[in-house]
Amino acid sequence: MAQIKVKQVKSSIKQLQKQKRILESLGLRGIGKEVSHDASRSILGMVEKVKHLVSVTKL
């Protein structure tokens, strides 16, 4: 399965609680933090919900 790297580029302050929980479940805890995940449907769905806060690159 393909890998993606997700990096948080904007703050979660003043965002909906649901979006904050999605960032935490992705493993992102602050601006500039990066994590890599398999590009599964569930991960891609979470990234889609917070696409205005993160940047995604394919590995």
Image (cartoon, rainbow, N blue to C red):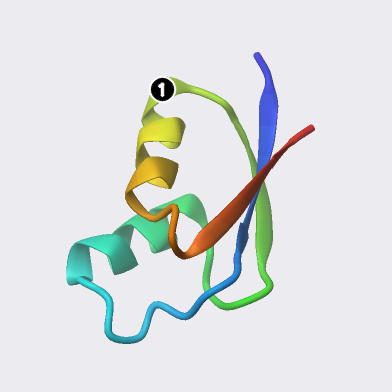
Mark 1, Cα crowd under 10 Å, few <14 / some 14-19 / many 20+, is few
- Residue type at mark 1: give it: Arg
The quarter of the picture where residue 3 lies is: top right
Where is residue 14? Give x, y as percent: 27, 85
The quarter of the picture where residue 2 lies is: top right
Whether 17 is drawn above or below 4: the answer is below
Q: Is residue 39 left or right of residue 42?
A: right
Where is residue 55? Give x, y as percent: 61, 54
- Name the element at disc 1: helix
Q: Which residue is mark 1?
A: 41
- Find the residue positioned furthest to the bottom: 13
- Find the residue positioned furthest to the left: 17
Foreground of the two, 32 or 37: 32
Q: At 59% across and 70% down in the image, what residue appears?
A: 9
Q: At 53% across and 64% down in the image, what residue appears?
A: 28
The quadrant of the picture occupied by the C terminus is: top right
Where is residue 53? Give x, y as percent: 47, 65
Q: At 52% across and 75% down in the image, what residue appears?
A: 10
Whether 58 is drawn above or below 31: the answer is above
Q: Is residue 45 left or right of residue 5?
A: left
